[in-house]
Image (cartoon, coloured by chain):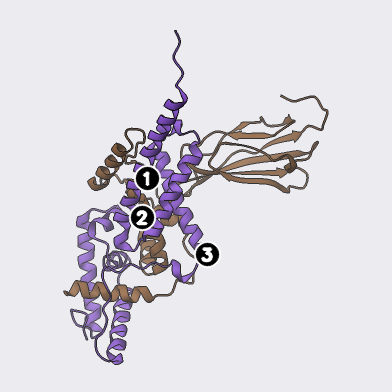
Chain colours: A brown, B purple
């Protein structure tokens, strides 16, 4: 066993005994940003230092790192092309899918930090619509969306009457979620793969009382 | 004459083919995750959980298998990234000691001989760990990754650096570490 191996094994043995850092843990999204090479260098170094000294964080990081690497999404930085190994693996996946799935390397420009993404646009109903029957809310797909969070609140008092986390771009409210004659406000927040978020404008609608003229 | 609509058997055959293609791709994906992560402690159970989640999400979100042909790389990436993030969140939500997976390239050093030898070995390990913590902020994470078992290419990929830059910082960092250990009375091979 050489010098380097001895150091490694001793370090790893001590690392395995380290308690989890009691301080605030980095968010999983930030660890994902580290795995994808999307953090600024200073932040990446600081976070790596912590991750590599905490066995629990390191295990979490490895889940995210291996997934990013397997998906062919190694860091795409201008100074360094993605490793050819990943490109070969990605190409093999594409062949395996018989041309129906394309699993290729993404070449996203790195960003300095995780931050807000572009806002999301609501589709229907229009602001101020009066609705009857099943109330269906729809919004435009965001190109980088991981998931959407819909929130519906009562105009009177602001109570949350419905929330939904979904990958879809439309949903129908449960009939008992709203009250005829009442007004509501709703909006959608999008979360991207790197944890950036964006929020739509707020729209309002009212629920037509029974027997009222059927709205469009 | 207009186009002939596909028969039910044609549609079923198409669905089967897409299903097989998806299964094959997802299974390969599982192999890639394990191939990349196992050396650093990623368990087969974790890889399997992520891959199963990816498979389910693809089917659920796309619904009709016909549309699987339109699934793009960015979508698959998002699904996989989301599945991995959710796995980490679930682990945090039900944090137990069993969730901690620690990578060791090989079996740790086990001190032979008396309990005193084992105690001495453990003390030595802790001194090495503490010594790493004294390194400069740019070199320390690189040395930590190296000692944790990551190779230079993996370190370079993580930091977006060239391998040459990693080699340079690692060399300096290890030299610093050995100097600290020497001052602490620990020899070049980590022996007292």
Would residue A167 appear left or right of B142 to someone viewing this image?
Answer: right
Q: Which quarter of the image is occupied by the C terminus of chain B? A: bottom left
Which numbered mark, 3 or 1, is in the foreground of this view? 1
Residue B94 is tagged as: 3
Q: Chain of mark 2?
A: A
Residue position marked by numbered label 1 in the rendering: B26
Please identify the residue farthest to the left as the structure is shown. A2
* Residue B70 visible in the picture: no
Point 46% across, 58% down: residue: B88
- Where residue B146 sits in the image (x, y, percent)? 26, 65
Q: Chain of mark 3?
A: B
- Where residue A3 sits in the image (x, y, percent)? 18, 75
Q: Residues within 10 Å of mark 1 (few under 14, many from 20)?
A: some
Q: Earlier in the sequence, mark 3 or mark 1?
A: 1
**Element marked by disc 1:** helix
Please identify the residue farthest to the top as the structure is shown. B1
Point 23% across, 59% down: residue: B152
**Element marked by disc 3:** loop
Residue position marked by numbered label 2 in the rendering: A65
**Element marked by disc 2:** helix
Query: Same chain, marks 2 and 1?
Result: no
Q: Which quarter of the image is occupied by the N terminus of chain B? A: top left
């Amino acid at each position: 066993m050489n010098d380097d191996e001895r150091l490694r094994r001793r370090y790893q043995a001590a690392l395995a005994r380290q308690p989890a850092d009691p301080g605030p843990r980095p968010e999983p999204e930030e660890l994902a940003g580290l795995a994808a090479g999307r953090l600024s260098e200073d932040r990446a170094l600081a976070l790596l230092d912590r991750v590599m000294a905490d066995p629990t964080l390191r295990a979490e990081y490895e889940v995210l790192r291996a997934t990013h690497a397997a998906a062919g999404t190694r860091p795409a930085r201008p100074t360094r092309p993605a490793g050819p190994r990943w490109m070969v693996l990605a190409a093999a996946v594409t062949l395996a899918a018989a041309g129906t799935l394309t699993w290729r390397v993404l070449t996203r420009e790195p960003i300095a930090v995780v931050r807000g993404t572009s806002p999301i646009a609501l589709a229907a109903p229009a602001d101020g619509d009066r609705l009857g029957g099943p109330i269906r809310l729809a919004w435009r797909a965001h190109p980088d969306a991981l998931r959407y969070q819909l929130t519906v609140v009562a105009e009177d008092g602001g109570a949350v009457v419905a929330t939904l986390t979904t990958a879809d771009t439309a949903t129908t409210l449960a009939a008992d979620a709203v009250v005829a004659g009442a007004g509501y406000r709703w909006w959608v927040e999008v979360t991207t793969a790197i944890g950036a978020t964006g929020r739509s404008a707020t729209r309002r609608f009212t629920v037509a009382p029974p027997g009222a003229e059927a709205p469009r | 004459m207009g186009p002939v609509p596909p028969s039910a058997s044609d549609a079923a055959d198409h669905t089967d083919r897409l299903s097989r293609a998806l299964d094959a791709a997802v299974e390969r994906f599982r192999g890639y995750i394990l191939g990349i992560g196992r050396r650093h402690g990623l368990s087969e159970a974790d890889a399997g959980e992520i891959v199963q989640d990816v498979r389910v999400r693809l089917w659920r979100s796309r619904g009709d298998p016909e549309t699987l042909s339109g699934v793009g790389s960015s979508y698959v990436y998002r699904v996989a990234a989301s599945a991995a993030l959710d796995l980490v969140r679930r682990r945090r939500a039900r944090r137990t000691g069993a969730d901690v997976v620690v990578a060791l390239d090989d079996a740790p050093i086990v001190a032979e001989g008396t309990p005193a030898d084992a105690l001495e070995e453990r003390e030595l390990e802790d001194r090495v760990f503490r010594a790493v913590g004294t390194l400069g902020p740019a070199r320390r994470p690189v040395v930590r990754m190296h000692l944790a078992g990551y190779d230079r290419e993996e370190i370079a990929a993580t930091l977006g650096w060239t391998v040459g830059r990693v080699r340079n910082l690692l060399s300096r960092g290890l030299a610093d570490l050995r100097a600290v250990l020497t001052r602490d009375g620990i020899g070049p091979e980590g022996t007292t």
